[in-house]
Image: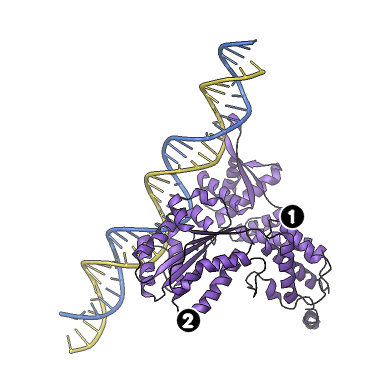
Chain colours: A purple, B yellow, C blue
Amino acid sequence: MAQKGLNGFFEKYLDETNIFKSKKALQISYTPETILHRDIQINTIAGILAPALREEKPSNLFIYGKTGTGKTLCIKHITNHMLSVAETRGTGLRIIYLNCKMKRIADTEYRLVAQIVKEMGQEIPATGLPTDEVYNIFFKLLEKNKDKITIIILDEIDQLIKKAGDEIIYNLTRINSDLVHTQISLVGISNNLIFTDAIDPRVRSSLSEEEVVFPPYNAPQIQDILKKRAETAFKEGVLEKGLIEKCAAYAAREHGDARRALELLRVAGEIAERKSLSKVRIDHLDEAEEKIEKERILEIVKTQPKQSQVTLLSIILLFEKEEKTCLTGDIYEIYKKLCAKTDLRPLTQRRVSDIIGELDMLGIITATVVSKGRYGRTREIKPNMPHALKQKIKEVLKEEQGLS
DNA sequence: CACCGTTCAGTTGAACTAAGCAACGGAATTCGG
DNA sequence: GAATTCCGTTGCTTAGTTCAACTGAACGGTGGA
């Protein structure tokens, strides 16, 4: 009986892949042949980096633009082309792409250099070596390789600098003067336009010899992009009329984030598919938006270290009771109680204060420092998510901490 | 009422510590001649 | 006697702690109108 049902399920499933033609085209990793509405940027960047193909050092480059404006896509597109040209011509060119945002991958000076070395094919211990030593290894590796030019792309560089300071960039730019056989160029990519104010002017000037700005897409542009991708991704006629327009409007509202628009479209398609419908309707978009948001936050929450999770749980629990913004001191009290229940060694308030700051950075909670006059100074904190999701997170966290 | 010093409850910065790790070098052990 | 393994030492990073200075507006007192 059960088996029969299962057979039926798969048959039904196969019959019903009548929404997508090739879902790949909507995935984030997908690199389309042509990139729309970014010709100026691509040409500029290509022009700046082109000297590398003649084995001359290109200027360091700084790229700004909000999330989902195609920065990463363009740079990958360009460097891929460069690499293939370099290969046919036999030019020594190496390109290293690093995303600094990834926690525990490249968020300190040591780890960043270690990661670059790893990209170049040599393992390096996670700790134990002096940073100078890692630089030395990196240095030797550069000299040993025959590549004339090495381009290092640091995505989300603002995160790195905020956490680890700007010395890294300074050191990396300075390395060039000691290199004989090779030269390195840096490409920094940042979401944040104003973050350069925070860094040392010397570092800034050396890093941004050239600058390229990626403006947000406007609604019609997103529409073009969506249409193009939808052509390859969806079967003909499965999209309800006006769906793409609506989707583009959603994304344009969120500062022109094309990545989000594509994700929205994909998830909407998946929802329709799961419901065994033959058409993707506009109201699926709302559902999709909700689902994406939910999964994004849940994913962040799950991957947090234990202490952060307990802190977050404290915040949610307290907020439930108080139903208004809550203060650091109160949260710390609850946190201590929770720690006692879970046999977790409680951290000091100092550290918890930092953790709250981190959670704020992640966008899971909103925490603002307020002065309560002579009743002190504290953070006002409230969770930043719909109620249903809070419940869900609460369950997940409780389960992970092993308390009910 | 306007002004001003005080006060509170954390925030924030800096120095410090413990835990983990790798490399180094000398001591102990093994091995082949 | 040489090669190999073992172990303690040293020096490093990182997460977290300790210490202490700093913060900024409400409170409450003061003086002036």
Q: Nearer the viewer, residue A86 or A69?
A: A86
Q: Nearer the viewer, residue A169 or A361?
A: A169
Q: Amino acid at mark 1?
A: Ala
Q: Quadrant of the rendered structure where residue A394 is?
A: bottom right
Q: CA distance from mark 2 to mark 1?
A: 58 Å
At 48% from the left edge and 58% from the top edge, which residue is drawn?
A: A209
Q: Are marks 2 and 1 on the same chain?
A: yes
Circles 2 and 1: CB atoms closer than 8 Å: no
* Above or below A16: residue C15: above
Does residue A393 show up? yes
Q: Secondary structure at mark 1?
A: helix
Q: Chain of mark 2?
A: A
* Above or below A32: residue A389: above
Locate the N terminus of chain A by quadrant.
bottom right
Q: Secondary structure at mark 2?
A: helix
Which of the two discs, 2 and 1, sits closer to the camera?
Answer: 2
Residue highlighted by disc 2: A89
Horizontal and vertical percent position of residue A376: 57, 33
Pick whichever of labels 2 and 1 is earlier in the sequence: 2
* Above or below B3: residue A254: below
* Above or below A366: residue A253: below
Horizontal and vertical percent position of residue C23: 53, 35
Q: Is residue A16 left or right of residue C20?
A: right
At 56% from the left edge and 71% from the top edge, which residue is drawn?
A: A78
| Circle on res. A60 | none
Q: Amino acid at mark 2?
A: Arg
Residue highlighted by disc 1: A388
Q: Chain of mark 1?
A: A
Horizontal and vertical percent position of residue A266: 73, 69
